[in-house]
Image: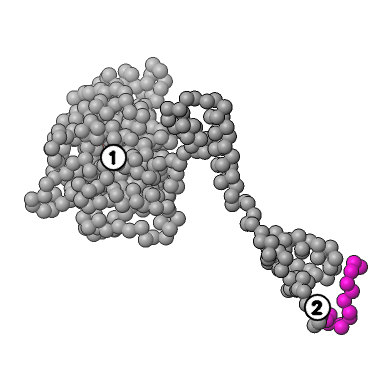
Amino acid sequence: MAVDDDGDILPDRDAAKGFYAKYEPKEVLGRGGCSVVRRCIEKETGQQFAAKIIDLSDSSDEGVYEATIREIEVLRMVAGHPYIIELHDVFESSTFIFLVFELCEHGELFDHLTTVVTLSEKKTKLIMRQLFEALAHVHGKGIVHRDLKPENILLDDNYNIKLTDFGFAKVLVPGETLTDVCGTPGYLAPEVLQFAMYEGSQGYTHAVDLWACGVIMYTLLVGCPPFWHRKQMVMLRNIMEGKYSFQSPEWEDITDAPKDLISKLLVLDPARRITVQEALTHDFFQILPSRSQIIVTTLREEQYKGRPFNAKKMFQFGIMCVRAVIRIQRLRFTPEPVSLAITRVDPYRIKALRKVIDNCAFRVYGHWVKKGEGQDRAALFQNCPKLDFPRTPMDVPLIIGKA
Ligand code: ADP
Ligand code: MG
């Protein structure tokens, strides 16, 4: 077995002739339990790919080969979705299996999050929507992923997600439940732990992926996972008790819709947890229609009420709608109505008039009624004559009128 400059295993050329004939392996992109993922270049086209090289010679795990074959089967079942990684090629030797995937230039969502710390609600919405769409496709085929986490969500050159690592994925027949404990501790659903700890537990199904989505979404928004504790046992207990909160200061700036979605994903009882389809229709993903969309929809509705089509009326109605919407939009700039009675008695109380009065007053008294020096300018308009005129320090009479 060959080793590269960094000490990473590179399969012997003899052991993997098919792969080497077609691809040139380059640097390591990531590592897993029994695999190394390398960038590689297709010799014929010069196109880049990511080759997951699985070492079968590691006798400590007998099931690696079978697990990889299952992973390939699942990858082929879910192929063709924009947010799921595409398997391009497979090579097999006696000691290695090569899975050649499309390359995700921007690597793991996990690394991206480490760089940016948190994502805005807008970006979280984009990523979570893509994740739920990918998951809807996976669940639609009866498959449970079982290892959803930011390390297994890759980002392509446009920062769109590609769900990957179907190593723990399992096809479920209706009514079937799973019992083995697999996944990554911080993302494990309570029912998975329940089964490991208590007799008589029923096992778990697709809902475990929705729980993991809740953990991912929480982490994206505030940069730390919901159940984390430096002692793993305490973290697992937090998961089983569903103990998390939106109390930290970071949550103050986050609106209610994402919090509501997270709280519907992180539900202890899997039967009451939101499904992937329900998640996709949650308020968090609803976009308010634009003004033009509202008008077009209203016009269409009018058209379909069965009335004979009248182009002139329809045009007038359209104009009315646009004018109404513009009026509503400008409402906050419209001045409040002015009361004639107050204007007569106390014009200075009305903001708009106050400005006019001040301007007029300044023209007359400009040289001594200065803004910000504490004079009561309203007093200038009181009806009764003011007798206690302020005196200058030198007791020099004030000159009224322009200098
Ligand atoms: P494992 O099952 O061993 O965890 P993964 O399929 O998750 O293997 O791959 C391990 C890591 O390799 C990923 O977390 C990622 O960093 C990197 N990787 C995998 N596939 C790709 C790809 N298509 N493009 C870029 N990086 C990848
Ligand atoms: Mg992985």
Please say if 195 is above or below 177.
below
Farthest residue, direction top: 44
Please say if 278 is above or below 193.
above
Is residue 72 in view from this perspective? Answer: no
Asked if residue 390 lies in the magenta stretch, the reply is yes
Q: Residue at x 29, y 49 (%)?
A: 264
Toward the viewer: 60 or 239?
Answer: 239
Callout 2, which amino acid?
A: Pro
**In the rendered image, which residue does mark 1 sit on?**
276
> Would you call the spot at circle 2 few (<14 residues within 10 Å), some (14-19), or many (20 or more)?
few
Q: Position of residue 23 (x, y in %)?
A: 34, 22
Please say if 103 is above or below 237.
above
Secondary structure under the numbered disc 1 in the rendered image: helix
Callout 1, which amino acid?
A: Val
Toward the viewer: 300 or 400?
Answer: 300
Please say if 80 is above or below 339.
above
> Would you call the spot at circle 1 few (<14 residues within 10 Å), some (14-19), or many (20 or more)?
many
Q: Quadrant of residue 394?
A: bottom right
Is residue 120 in view from this perspective? Answer: yes
Q: In 3D space, how far apart are the residues under numbered discs 1 and 2 (Cα atoms)?
A: 77 Å
Q: Is residue 227 left or right of residue 373?
A: left
Q: Position of residue 3 (x, y in %)?
A: 30, 32
Question: In the rendered structure, which segment of residues is drawn in magenta?
Answer: 389-403
Q: Is residue 41 left or right of residue 143?
A: right
Where does the C terminus fall, quadrant-wise? bottom right
Q: Are marks 1 and 2 in contact (CB under 8 Å)?
A: no
**In the rendered image, which residue does mark 2 sit on?**
385
In this picture the colour scheme is: one colour
